[in-house]
Image (cartoon, rainbow, N blue to C red):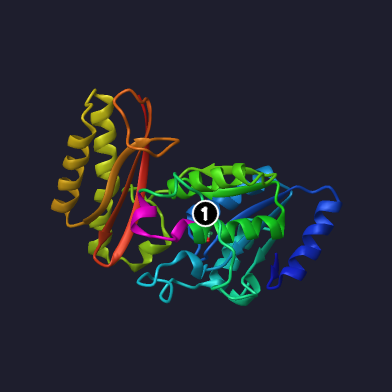
Amino acid sequence: MKIFETRADLQHVLSESRQSGQTIGLVPTMGNLHEGHLTLVDAARGQCDFVLATIFVNPLQFGPAEDLDKYPKTLEADCKALESRHCDGVFVPSISEMYPNGLQDQTLIIVPGISEGHCGSSRPGHFSGVCTVVSKLFNLTQPDKAFFGEKDYQQLQVIRKMTSDLCFPLDIIGVPTVRLPDGLALSSRNSYLNEEQKGIAVSLQQSLQATKEKLLQGASSMQTLEREAKDFLSDCGLKVDYFNISHAHSLKPAKTSDTDLVILAAAWVGPTRLIDNIRVQL
Ligand code: PAF
């Protein structure tokens, strides 16, 4: 597996691959790779000739009080894991390689509407930071397909809209969330949790599953369902950020007539903020 630190090296190899007729699959990550990321690599491996992962902890998508400084960095282990899944290359740029003119002057991408509620409300500027770095990665690598996890459901929808609105010529592929046997969604931030907190964190998925079942059984007051789930989560020891039953595509609050839903949730377990979601087809 090739490791690229500069855009020039990366683009040289990618243009050779493209010229020899290979398709390129991009797997953007912030590192500290777990099975969820590696499943994205597997999906890319199954659909593309040249699989490129990127590892870049993007400062632009972290708020001033967020965990940028303590975000886990495990480059050696990440490279071994990528290699074991037959990834062809990994791009590990420095901040100055990605933002040569600095962060302050960086042109930003804003995706209106869909990026505004949920995590967009709790983390102002987050999706603009995500879209800016992802669009730069799209331009630098010109992939045929890019792979993102469904765990970050709102991020996936925001990136889909950006890709369509800005006419990026590639397919966005969503890959199902990987979970521990107890239901906890894999996340790099799980590494912040101690054993007791891991036990508490499972309630997030349980609350989503329970709400889904109530909807399938005919419950129709979204507000009541959201309140019950929030009460359950508080009783389990989580601090709820949001628990929203939404339309699966617009991410607007679900109406009783909607049939394609997603329940999006974010909650704090101690100092760690976790997100999860579940789809519901009525
Ligand atoms: O989902 C992530 O890990 C990040 O938001 C992404 C897409 C790699 C952009 O930095």
What residue is rendered at 61% in x and 41% in y?
Answer: 164
What residue is rendered at 59% in x and 64% in y?
Answer: 107
Q: Nearer the viewer, residue 166 or 193?
A: 166
- Is 151 placed left or right of 104 in the picture? left
Residue 226 at what x, y percent from top left? Answer: 22, 40
Q: Is residue 141 visible?
A: yes
**199 in the magenta segment:** no
Q: Nearer the viewer, residue 237 or 228?
A: 228
| Rendered view: 28 above or below 191 | above
- Is 5 placed left or right of 236 in the picture? right
Residue 65 at what x, y percent from top left? Answer: 35, 72
SS state under label 1: loop
Classified by dominant secondary structure, the portion drawn in magenta counts as helix
Q: Quadrant of residue 51?
A: bottom right
Q: Which residue is mark 1?
A: 110
Three-letter residue code for mark 1: Ile
What residue is rendered at 24% in x and 23% in y?
Answer: 218
**126 in the magenta segment:** yes
Residue 245 at what x, y percent from top left? Answer: 30, 38
| Rendered view: 249 above or below 18 | above
Q: Nearer the viewer, residue 122 or 77?
A: 122
Q: Is residue 86 visible?
A: no
Q: Which residues are magenta?
A: 118-127
Q: Quadrant of the C terminus?
A: top left
What residue is rendered at 44% in x and 61% in y?
Answer: 125
